């Protein structure tokens, strides 16, 4: 019978055959964040709808078309986390974390919900690995978050992926850029999509983010934000570049970067790889805290899609097998096998046994399939002698040891083979 239910469109189950890869990526991210001094923050899965409307901006696709919004039983409008930055800034303001001028360096690994058209690497629920550095205005920290991402990317074995970098100015210089865009699109806007027509009135920068092919075509030759930067923004951008240069970080200045959210000011960056949507995107958002009703608090950060990272990493390696598989060669050996498994786990080893009364042959096959390093065999002889037979699955060497000595012997064996195969 075909199962009645499937995971909702645009979502996926992360099954054991790939979840270990997710864990590896998450662990590398946590470790990079630790080294850079970023502490974890966990915010709720849903927020007041208005937080995202104000934070991301009404003219964005995110707010216009993609939010999962619902009324709760108390009639409050709530929205599933549609992006990571506004909730983090909300939490920083709510708990006064930058009140004494401290810089808050935070990271998160969190599911994000967007009603998007599903395709390879684009989901309706995806996970973002993100950092937010809140409270520091200088270009050094912009370079730091880019360096952090690239180091993490390298740690998980991804090469290439040169960041694209731009500056989109601030409220001081943006009006001149917006005016230039309006002038550029004046004759074209009537033939563009309905959303662009609204964007033309509300925020012409958003026209540069439209995905409709005709509108993408229509923006060829549009003015570049970099040509409209005020002195302060130009200086800040030069500072970011100097820091990246000093760190020996390769990047590409790309004035076509617009970012999909309205809170960005100055630095904007993305990591793009061919054949897949952006791996990472971020930038500075110096006005966001004020937009959310707080004091002026600068910030910069990025978000990177976990599914996309795993996709790009590919499937070239196998999951790590257990340290130990305990095979019971007689029915009476099952209880001692079970006890040995628990004792091994308590001693820090990963241990597997059979739970379904399979034959010894089937158990050995399973130990092979799992990639166990050592098999401990308990059969009638071993029961009589109070021993176990240990087989090193890499070398095929066998040895009989007293059951009380089994765990130290296995630990030694596993330790040695770990050194051989780091
Ligand atoms: P974003 O560019 O919307 O920025 O998303 C960041 C990253 O999340 C993207 O580069 C991509 O890797 C991943 N991503 C986005 N949408 C999807 C999707 N539907 N399916 C799979 N992956 C996706 C933000 O959300 C900002 N909050 C980033 C940021 C943090 N800016 C400053 N701080």
Image: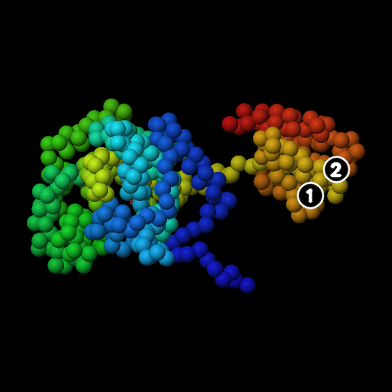
Q: Residue furthest right?
A: 384
Residue 54 lies, in percent from the top left, at 26, 54
Going from N to C along the chain, the mark reached first, 2 or 1, is: 1
Q: Is residue 407 left or right of residue 289?
A: right
Give the image quarter of residue 29: top left
Q: Secondary structure at mark 2?
A: loop
User: On residue 361, which mark appears?
Assistant: 1
Q: Is residue 21 left or right of residue 359?
A: left
Q: Residue at x 46, y 38 (%)?
A: 30
Residue 72 lies, in percent from the top left, at 41, 64
Question: How crowded is the residue under tag 2: few (<14 C-alpha within 10 Å), some, or many (20+)?
Answer: many
User: On residue 405, which mark appears?
Assistant: none
Q: Residue at x 87, y 40 (%)?
A: 383
- Residue 190 sits above or below residue 310 on the image: below
Of badges 2 and 1, the one in the foreground is: 2
Nearer to me, 311 or 76: 76
Residue 222 lies, in percent from the top left, at 15, 53
User: On residue 379, which mark appears?
Assistant: 2
- Residue 197 sits above or below residue 287 on the image: below
Q: Is residue 20 visible?
A: yes
- Residue 97 sits above or below residue 196 on the image: above
Q: Secondary structure at mark 1?
A: helix
CA gap, disc 2 and disc 1: 13 Å
Q: Quadrant of the N terminus?
A: bottom right
Q: Is residue 413 visible?
A: no
């Amino acid at each position: 019978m075909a199962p009645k239910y499937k995971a909702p469109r645009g979502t996926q189950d992360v099954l054991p055959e790939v979840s270990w890869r997710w864990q590896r990526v998450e662990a590398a991210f946590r470790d990079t964040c630790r080294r850079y001094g970023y502490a974890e923050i966990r915010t709720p899965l849903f927020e007041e709808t208005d937080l995202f409307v104000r934070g991301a901006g009404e003219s964005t696709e995110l707010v216009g078309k993609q939010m999962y919004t619902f009324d709760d039983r108390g009639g409050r409008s709530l929205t599933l986390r549609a992006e990571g930055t506004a909730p983090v800034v909300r939490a920083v303001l709510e708990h006064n974390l930058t009140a004494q001028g401290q810089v808050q360096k935070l990271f998160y690994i969190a599911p994000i919900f967007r009603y998007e058209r599903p395709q390879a690497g684009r989901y309706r629920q995806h996970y973002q690995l993100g950092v937010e550095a809140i409270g520091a205005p200088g270009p050094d920290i912009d370079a730091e978050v880019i360096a952090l991402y690239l180091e993490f990317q390298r740690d998980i074995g991804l090469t290439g992926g040169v960041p694209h970098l731009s500056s989109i100015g601030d409220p001081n210089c943006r009006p001149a850029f917006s005016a230039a865009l309006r002038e550029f699109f004046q004759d074209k806007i009537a033939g563009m999509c309905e959303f662009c027509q609204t964007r033309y009135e509300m925020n012409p920068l958003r026209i540069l983010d439209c995905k409709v092919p005709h509108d993408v075509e229509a923006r060829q030759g549009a003015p570049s934000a970099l040509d409209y930067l005020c002195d302060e923004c130009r200086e800040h951008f030069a500072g970011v570049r100097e820091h990246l240069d000093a760190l020996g970080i390769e990047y590409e200045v790309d004035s076509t970067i617009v970012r999909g959210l309205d809170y960005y000011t100055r630095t904007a960056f993305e990591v793009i790889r061919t054949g897949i949507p952006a791996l990472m995107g971020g930038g500075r958002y110096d006005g966001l805290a004020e937009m959310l009703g707080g004091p002026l608090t600068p910030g910069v950060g990025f978000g990177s899609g976990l599914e996309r990272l795993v996709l790009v990493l590919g499937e070239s390696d196998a999951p790590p097998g257990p340290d130990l598989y305990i095979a019971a060669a007689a029915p009476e050996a099952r209880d001692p096998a079970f006890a040995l498994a628990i004792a091994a786990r308590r001693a820090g080893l990963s241990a597997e046994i059979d739970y379904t009364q399979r034959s010894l042959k089937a158990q050995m096959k399973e130990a092979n399939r799992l990639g166990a390093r050592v098999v401990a065999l308990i059969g009638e002889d071993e029961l009589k002698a109070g021993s176990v037979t240990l087989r090193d699955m890499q070398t095929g060497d066998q040895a009989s040891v007293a059951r009380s000595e089994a765990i130290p012997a296995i630990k030694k064996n596993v330790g040695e083979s770990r050194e051989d195969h780091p």
